[in-house]
Amino acid sequence: TFGAFVCFKPATVEGGEFLIADAAKILRDLDPDVAQLMYDKQIRISVSNLDFDFLDYAGPLKPTLMDAAKSAIDTLVAPKFDMDLEMIYGADGRPMRLQAVEQTASPINRHPETGLPLWFCNVHNHARYLRDNRKCNVPEVGMTEVYYGDLERIPHDVLDHINKVSEKNIAHIPMAAGDVLLCDNYRVLHGRDVFVGDRYHAVTWFADGFKEPSASQAADDDDASSPGGGKPGNVLNNLINKYVVDAF
């Protein structure tokens, strides 16, 4: 699969550079023991948080209301987009926090055509510990987290190493209106830097038999001018706000 990333409007104030990294080079530069550990343990990524601390005041109704909230999100939110999510309370140590967690996945995959081993995950971007230690303007409901496959917390020294190697291999690509960047979605990790102001990018995908995504899915992941955005966390947050939070 190839992605064509198009810049319609760069950030109006500052930031927002497109970021790319060679997944093969990241895997090459990782400590072999860390790479083996991550491959053996696998990973799960939480894409959104929803705090139900107010249910602490519900007395004997608390367990029933917690189950009802979880069921409502499972029923009203999960079917709205193509992700296999599990709603889990307390994975990050906060018993009243409900997280939408992706199923277990391998952080290392082979390229479907070349067979080249690749670092196929964005741990450095989604780990809460790393996000808390750099500039980040994502609201709490949209903060992500990365766990081992058994939901054990990943040690900070492992995350620090992955982040160091990832940062070493990231290239910052300034894009002006009309610029298009074409990349192999299996070989290249991609994202964007934080920005101030408005920014509008979009993406289209090219592959044999690939189904064209909807307009909201094609919108830039974190575009401030896009109502829904294509990022799973953003979609989930909007749906939670519409169907769950408003219901209480």
Image (cartoon, rainbow, N blue to C red):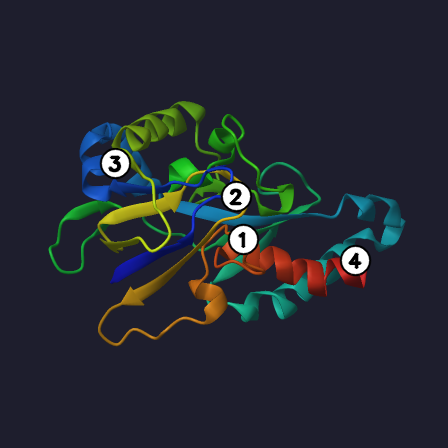
Q: What residue is disc 1 on?
A: 233
Between discs 4 and 2, the one toward the N terminus: 4
Image location of residue 172, percent across then percent down: 32, 36
Between discs 4 and 1, the one toward the N terminus: 4
Which of labels 3 and 2 is toward the front?
2
Q: Quadrant of residue 178?
A: bottom left
Image location of residue 28, percent across then percent down: 18, 34
Three-letter amino acid code of the residue under disc 3: Gln
Three-letter amino acid code of the residue under disc 2: Thr
Label number found at residue 144: 2
- Mark-to-mark CA distance, 4 and 2: 25 Å
Task: Judge the density around disc 2: few (<14), some (14-19), many (≥20) Cα neighbours within 10 Å.
Answer: many
Q: What residue is disc 3 on?
A: 36
Q: Quadrant of the N terminus?
A: bottom left
- Mark-to-mark CA distance, 1 and 3: 28 Å
Residue 111 lies, with reference to residue 239, above or below; the image says above
- Mark-to-mark CA distance, 4 and 3: 42 Å
Which of labels 1 and 3 is toward the front?
1
Task: Judge the density around disc 3: few (<14), some (14-19), many (≥20) Cα neighbours within 10 Å.
Answer: few
- Mark-to-mark CA distance, 1 and 2: 8 Å
Residue depicted at x 28% and y 29%:
165
Between discs 3 and 2, the one toward the N terminus: 3
Residue depicted at x 51% and y 35%:
128
Between discs 1 and 2, the one toward the N terminus: 2
